[in-house]
Image (cartoon, helix red, strand yellow):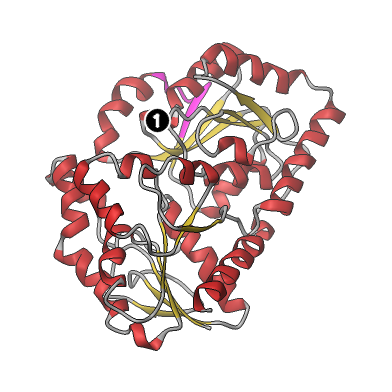
Amino acid sequence: MKIAQLSTPLIPVPPPNYGGTELVVHNITEELVKRGHEVTLFATGDSKTSAKLVAPFSNALNPQEMERLFSPLALRLFWTHSLPSLYHAVSVFERASEFDIIHDHFHYIGLVFSNVVKTPVLHTYHGDLKTAQSSTIERLFFEKYRNLPWTAISESQKKNSHVPLNFVSVIHHGVPIEKFSFNENPEDYLVWVGRITPKKGLHYAIQTAKQVGKPLKIAGVIHPRDEEFFQKEIKPHLDEKLILFVGALGLEDKVSLLKNAKALLYPVTWEEPFGLVMIEAMATGTPVIAFAHGAVSEVIVNEETGFLILGEGSVEALVDATKKIYSLPQGEYTELRKRSRKRVEDNFTVEKMVDKYEKVYQSILK
């Protein structure tokens, strides 16, 4: 097949550190190329790919810098409707006739143009649809394009869509498991990885580590809109002894951090549409302790690959679950790590993800 993948203009493919959507686009693209498809990736010029790269911009546009200049509402409108965003998306739709199918990962902009080309367009929204459809204007937008073919990245994301979109499949993300080496014998620390924002629950992870008395290593990025949260709720606890901030990490350093951790703390407080870091940790054998919000329970099997905390969740429950991890006999803990790895092998590899996308492409073309 001749397949176009439309990424965002905000972050390179693959991302140098943070960038969930762009990382998924990279994994899909590379696997499709490996399978012999003729793939064209529409992304930024600083992207690296085995596919043919078409880059409307030589470098990724900088959303962090834009956030310093605009209010959150103005920023959202800017990136949704701005000329740069339109220009980036137009590039693929101008050439639509060259492809059998277009896979759109760029939200609103891709929707606008998909109805004016004959080439079929599949839409994958990578965020929380409940939040995305929270305003009247945005809900009307989704209503207009509800009958186009969509894939959800989890059952939770599908369920939480206010607008009943035409979901042709639910396809969980996958990781290139060969890049995530398994480790039976981790070091004695906990880990948290992600964007440092209230809904990701880092403040709960810090409280848990302090109560358990175990080191917590934090890897993540801080967007300007979350700077106040970081300064007030996170930075005062950083002491380079018990609570350590290692910043944003590339793939190799992230794998090393995850595989040597006793457990990943993932106390998200929102309807997480997927959560890539969970399967990244489990691929290395590291079990996950998490609040069961959103798609978390689709990834973790309670007491088999980690611990799910039901209901609203609390620091006390996190502490209890973390103590359970540390109280396991070595043999049982090793089995827990092996089961975590096997769950990813069986359900969340790039190969399994792309198997499903291939079937969706073929069904749409029929």
Q: Nearer the viewer, residue 123 or 313?
A: 123
Image position of 45 with respect to 342: above or below: below
Front residue (pair 261, 157): 157
Query: Residue 245, relative to residue 316: is it above or below?
Result: below
Quadrant housing residue 271: top left
- The residue range painted magenta reads 237-245
Q: Looking at the picture, tell me which residue is in the foreground, 317 or 195.
A: 317
278, above or below 227, in the image? below
Tell which residue pokes out farthest to the bottom in this image.
98
Indicate whether residue 45 is drawn in magenta: no
Residue 184: tell me if it is visible.
Answer: yes
- What's the amino acid at mark 1? Lys
Where in the figure is residue 238, as x and y percent of width and height?
42, 23
Residue located 27% across and 58% down the image: 144
Q: Is residue 267 left or right of residue 120?
A: right
The residue that mark 1 highlights is: 199
Q: Residue furthest right?
A: 331
Residue drawn at (56%, 11%), measured in percent from left and top?
Answer: 316
Q: Position of residue 5 (x, y in %)?
A: 42, 72
Residue 275, horizontal then vertical, whole percent:
51, 43
Left or right for 142, reference 51: left
Residue drawn at x 73%, y 28% as measured from the top left: 303
Residue nearer the viewer, 185 or 233: 233
Where 102 falls versus 189 (above or below)? below
Kindly tell me whether residue 16 is visible in this rendering. no
Badge 1: residue crowd in 10 Å (few <14, some 14–19, many ≥20) = some
Q: Secondary structure at mark 1?
A: helix
Looking at the rendered structure, the number of numbered marks drawn on it comes to 1
